[in-house]
Image (cartoon, rainbow, N blue to C red):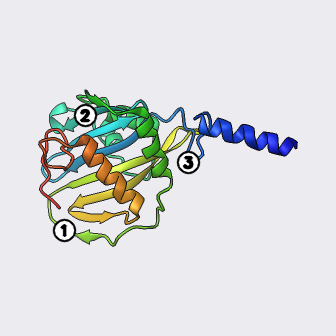
Amino acid sequence: MKILKLLILFLSLSFSGCIDLFGPDGPDQKYLFDVYYVNNAWGFVLNGIYIDKSGDVYSYSISQEDHISDDTLRVIQNQREVIKEGYLDLRYSFKRKFVKNIDPVLVRKKLADLYRIPLKAMSDTLGTGADMGAYIYTGYRFNGQDKTYERVDLKVTGDISYSNTSQTALDLVKWLDSELHSGGTGKTKVPGYTFRGK
């Protein structure tokens, strides 16, 4: 009888939203999704738009005109799979502008979807250009113990192109486009850059 009562209590808490059955609890995760363009061909350029845990959307932009030090540039350019939170704090501090707010409940659901993506469901990597840079859709999985983020690439187009082929990843890319697009194109518009890839 005790087990039945505990099961009923657990289920009622779950459906009331106190326990998330479908994804991480992660109340300390600050950064969720990022769509950005990066190019080093003729000087460093990084323009992007990210979503935080409150559903707030911000644009940011970094270029060589910002006269940042080589050490800071190395931190910002970090493309390793595991990233320290301080690195993202720095990256998102440049020319940051508030864009809009997305319903936090919806954002939370999309974050739970991100945690369900099979990381090995990747397409082949194709060489598709030269000096184009890269246009990247990514999400972050958070490790609260050491405050690091695992970068999960959903789609990359540019000098090289690849994507996660799972339906969940494809749906997240479509959702990001629908939430972050401008100009009626249905494609995410990163401030300061219009990508011409597929």
Say how many tags the image has. 3
Q: Amino acid at mark 3?
A: Phe
* Whole-number angstrom distance, CA of label 1 to CA of label 2: 27 Å
What residue appears at the point 53 percent right and 32 percent down from the top-left corner?
A: 28
Q: Amino acid at mark 1?
A: Thr
Residue 105, image quadrant: top left
Q: Secondary structure at mark 3?
A: loop
In the rendered image, residue 144, in percent from the top left (x then y), is placed at: 57, 38
Which quarter of the rendered picture does the C terminus lie within?
Answer: bottom left
Q: Which dot marks residue 59?
A: 2
What residue appears at the point 40 percent right and 37 percent down from the top-left corner?
A: 87
Q: Secondary structure at mark 2?
A: strand
In this rendered view, identify the residue nearer to me: 54 or 160. Answer: 54
Which residue occupies the extreme right position in the image?
1
From the viewer's perspective, is 153 left or right of 183? Answer: right
Q: Which dot marks residue 128?
A: 1
Check the image and report above or below for 11 versus 165.
above
Residue 18, image quadrant: top right
Task: Select label 3 or label 1 by which is in front.
Answer: 3
What residue appears at the point 21 percent right and 46 percent down from the top-left corner?
A: 188
In this rendered view, identify the residue nearer to me: 93 or 142. Answer: 142
From the viewer's perspective, is 106 left or right of 38? Answer: right
Q: Which dot marks residue 150?
A: none
The residue identified by callout 3 is 22
Q: Earlier in the sequence, mark 1 or mark 2?
A: 2
In the rendered image, residue 103, in percent from the top left (x then y), is placed at: 38, 33
Query: 10 Å neighbourhood of mark 2: few (<14), some, or many (≥20)?
Result: many
Residue 179, image quadrant: top left
What residue appears at the point 36 percent right and 52 percent down from the top-left corner?
A: 172
Q: Amino acid at mark 2?
A: Ser
Which quarter of the rendered picture does the N terminus lie within?
Answer: top right
Q: Earlier in the sequence, mark 2 or mark 3?
A: 3
